[in-house]
Image (spheres, coloured by chain):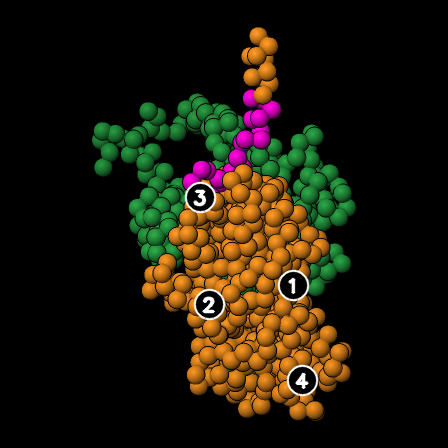
Chain colours: A orange, B green
């Protein structure tokens, strides 16, 4: 009787300890990815999903994470926050994912945040590293990437020190949202630190396509260095207006302009614009990655490779490393703990090494400055990764 | 099966339905909906709650556009007002949810009167553009009133408890949504059969004739705006409870377009049509997702590169095909089906 009682007691005690977290079996680990797979910004999500896939296939080819293969499940949110919430609910309830790597845009990740917190879901945000994502810090959320503030500060510092004339006039045009606010913070910091002449700061509504009035204002103020807070077609329209007015500009751009599709939109304006980014845009590391990707993805998918691919690849590598360190007894709690202790993870030169051992659980804050060369249609590195 | 409707008393004329079969089916549906949390998983409940918020919004828009003939593209603005009012009162002021929900509706009603007054002289596309401009103004106000709305950062919605239950997740949220949806549908059905509802329909059909018959256009048009916005505000509040986060990006113009699509697809002017349209469009993406995942491998290159876009195109295509071949909408299909079975086997 005593033996039976101890056996039952033992089973009861051992039950919860042996019960694996959702998404983990003896052979697989499911990682979720909520992304922009449809709509005008679909190329962001497509690029991102390639990075996750390459990282997963790379580790799977080497035997998986402690013998378990990574399975990536992507859900489309079309860049609509309400759909991000539904997509993550589906990943959690139906697919039973273990962790999350793709998190779409800033508003989208915030819409998913209550679910992430509730499910204690290990999450790496490498696509929208805005301060609102890591302030306040959520215990299971790890952010990889610099702020737009630092990306613009880095570019303006470089322009001020190496490119602009001493009498240069600086102007800012930015969206009227959290993203634009962050850019303005970088602009303000640069203006203050380098005592720049900056008479114009213009806000515009997200979705604006006609910037003739804004650019005319810039021209009137004699702006020669432009912190351009437009993205994709918006950024291209701003530069195109500036070209129409024959403005001699040095444009500093958002990192979304560091992808081939955006560069093709901006190039006709004829400006060799700058971009600040926390991932490498061109160099041996990128070549090496492309060679690796060729092994695991199709020709069509190779065309989608962009900076978002590198960001997701690094995010997935960080998750994989944390899971690997947990050994066979993989749990969400252990993964979070290992992510918290992750330091010096080499990304092969695609970014500065990953280090989450800080209060904000934030890494990849070092920024490199690049310049687009219209003739060769490539980005030329101007600085290495530097903390600003 | 019954083939005609002979009404012998005024009471029968104003009854919601005098058919025992209809009441039996409504009862069965009610039982099914009450038991739903025991039958389906959390994900399906999430989809159903989203669909219920869409139903409330569509029924409310139907009062304004379908019944009164006032085209509105300002739904996303009213949704945002309701959602933000609920979020601010709950999270920043700590008010109970039984107070914040009606307050969200009333705030949207108050704002609607500001939009409604200048809209009284406008009709058709002019009114549509005015209401569209209103939703832009609302998003501007939200972005720039940081002290109240937290600006672009948005608000995390927390602390909604009713009878001790957290009504932001699971079955408590579902039952709250069910009660709100049932209340909205009942209110809409009842309003349709009152003097107000008949006045709205008269205004829609011919406003000059309606005025000649003694209908006060100012009063009834404003009333349509106010009542419709109240329910849209409630739908916004429900969305904020479910998402647990509000941000101006959540309330894009696409929501206004989708709401119009719902009532057109369902059958303009009919409450049942608005309900069916909202359910149809809310579940169509999920049906397409399941359909495509059955015929293609979600891990394949084809899926990653093309299926998401094909799904988007299919979504639009279904709507276009539907409107081309069934211009009366889903409710028209329902009527056709009823007629067919009523006359069976002599139907033609």
Seen from the viewer's position, the closer of residues A259 and B95 is A259
Q: Are marks 4 and 2 in contact (CB under 8 Å)?
A: no
Seen from the viewer's position, the closer of residues B137 and A272 is A272
Q: Earlier in the sequence, mark 1 or mark 3?
A: 3
Q: Chain of mark 3?
A: A
Q: Earlier in the sequence, mark 4 or mark 1?
A: 4
Q: Nearer the viewer, mark 4 or mark 3?
A: 3
Q: Chain of mark 2?
A: A
Q: Nearer the viewer, mark 1 or mark 2?
A: 2
Q: Secondary structure at mark 3?
A: loop
Instruction: State the residue at coordinates (57%, 71%).
Output: A277
Are marks 2 and 3 in one subunit?
yes
Q: Which residue is mark 1?
A: A178
Q: Secondary structure at mark 2?
A: loop
Query: Relative to A76, is B35 above or below?
Result: above
Q: Chain of mark 1?
A: A
CA gap, disc 2 and disc 3: 30 Å
- Mark number, residue A67: 3
Q: Earlier in the sequence, mark 4 or mark 3?
A: 3
Q: Quadrant of the N terminus of chain B?
A: top left
- Mark number, residue A160: 4
Q: Earlier in the sequence, mark 4 or mark 2?
A: 4
Q: Position of residue A2 (x, y in %)?
A: 60, 10
Q: Secondary structure at mark 4?
A: helix
Q: Position of residue B329 (x, y in %)?
A: 38, 46
CA gap, disc 4 and disc 1: 26 Å
**Magenta-colored span:** A11-30
Image-based side of A338 in relation to B36, left or right: right
Query: Relative to A57, is B15 above or below?
Result: above
> Neighbour class for label 2 at 10 Å: few (<14), some, many (≥20)?
many
Q: Which residue is mark 2?
A: A306
Q: Quadrant of the C terminus of chain B?
A: top left
């Amino acid at each position: 009787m005593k033996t039976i009682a101890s056996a039952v007691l033992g089973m009861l005690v051992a039950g919860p300890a042996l019960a694996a977290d959702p998404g983990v079996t003896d052979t697989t680990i499911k990682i979720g990815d909520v992304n922009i797979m449809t709509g005008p910004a679909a190329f962001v999500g497509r690029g991102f999903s390639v990075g996750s896939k390459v990282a997963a296939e790379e580790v799977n080819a080497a035997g998986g994470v402690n013998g378990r293969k990574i399975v990536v499940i992507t859900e489309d949110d079309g860049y609509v926050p309400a759909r991000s919430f539904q997509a993550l609910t589906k990943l959690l309830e139906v697919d039973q994912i273990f962790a999350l790597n793709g998190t779409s845009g800033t508003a989208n990740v915030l819409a998913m945040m209550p679910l992430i917190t509730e499910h204690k879901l290990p999450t790496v945000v490498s696509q929208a590293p805005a301060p609102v994502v890591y302030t306040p810090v959520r215990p299971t959320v790890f952010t990889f990437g610099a702020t737009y503030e630092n990306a613009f500060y880095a570019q303006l510092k470089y322009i001020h020190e190496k490119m602009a004339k001493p009498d240069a006039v600086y102007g800012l045009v930015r969206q009227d949202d959290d993203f634009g606010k962050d850019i303005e913070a970088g602009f303000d910091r640069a203006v203050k630190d380098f005592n720049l002449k900056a008479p114009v700061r213009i806000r515009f509504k997200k979705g604006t396509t006609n910037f003739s009035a804004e650019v005319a204002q810039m021209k009137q103020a004699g702006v020669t260095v432009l912190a351009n807070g437009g993205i994709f077609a918006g950024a291209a329209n701003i530069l195109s207006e500036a070209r129409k007015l024959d403005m001699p500009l040095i444009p500093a751009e958002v990192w979304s302009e560091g992808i081939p599709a955006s560069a093709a939109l901006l190039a006709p304006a004829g400006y060799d614009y700058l971009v600040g980014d926390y991932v490498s845009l061109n160099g041996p590391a990128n070549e090496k990655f492309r060679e690796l990707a060729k092994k695991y993805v199709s020709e069509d998918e190779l065309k989608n490779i962009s900076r978002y691919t590198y960001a997701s690849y690094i995010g997935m590598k960080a998750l994989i490393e944390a899971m690997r360190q947990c050994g066979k007894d993989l749990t969400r709690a252990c993964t979070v703990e290992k992510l918290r202790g992750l330091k010096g993870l080499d990304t092969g030169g695609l970014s500065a090494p990953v280090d989450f051992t800080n209060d904000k659980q934030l890494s990849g804050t070092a920024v490199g400055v690049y310049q687009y060369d219209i003739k060769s249609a490539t980005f030329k590195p101007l600085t290495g990764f530097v903390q600003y | 099966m019954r083939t005609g409707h002979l009404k012998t008393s005024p009471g029968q004329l104003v009854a919601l339905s005098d058919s025992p079969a209809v009441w039996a089916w409504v009862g069965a549906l009610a039982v099914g909906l009450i038991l739903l949390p025991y039958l389906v998983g959390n994900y399906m409940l999430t989809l159903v709650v989203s669909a219920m918020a869409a139903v409330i919004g569509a029924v409310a828009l139907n009062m304004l556009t379908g019944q009164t003939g006032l085209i509105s593209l300002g739904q996303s603005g009213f949704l945002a007002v309701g959602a933000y009012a609920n979020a601010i009162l709950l999270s920043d002021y700590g008010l109970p949810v039984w107070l914040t929900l009606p307050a969200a509706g009333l705030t949207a009603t108050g704002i609607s009167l500001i939009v409604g007054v200048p809209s009284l002289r406008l009709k058709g596309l002019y009114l549509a553009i005015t209401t569209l401009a209103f939703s832009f103004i609302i998003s501007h106000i939200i972005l720039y009133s940081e002290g109240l709305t937290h600006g672009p950062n948005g608000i995390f919605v927390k602390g909604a408890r009713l009878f001790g239950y957290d009504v932001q997740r699971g079955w408590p949220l579902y039952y709250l949504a069910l009660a709100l949806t049932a209340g909205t549908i009942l209110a809409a059905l009842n309003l349709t059969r009152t003097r107000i509802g008949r006045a709205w329909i008269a205004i829609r059909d011919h406003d000059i004739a309606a005025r000649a018959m003694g209908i006060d256009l100012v009063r009834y048009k404003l009333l349509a705006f106010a009542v419709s916005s109240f329910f849209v505000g409630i739908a916004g509040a429900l969305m904020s409870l479910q998402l647990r986060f509000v941000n101006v990006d959540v309330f894009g113009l696409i929501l206004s377009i989708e709401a119009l699509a719902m009532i057109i697809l369902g059958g303009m002017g009919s409450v049942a049509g608005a309900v069916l349209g909202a359910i149809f469009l809310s579940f169509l993406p999920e049906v397409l997702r399941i359909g495509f995942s059955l015929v293609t491998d979600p891990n394949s290159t084809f899926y990653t590169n093309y299926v998401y876009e094909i799904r988007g195109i299919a979504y639009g295509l279904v709507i276009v095909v539907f409107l081309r071949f069934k211009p009366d909408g889903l409710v028209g299909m329902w009527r056709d089906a009823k007629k067919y079975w009523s006359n069976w086997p002599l139907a033609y």
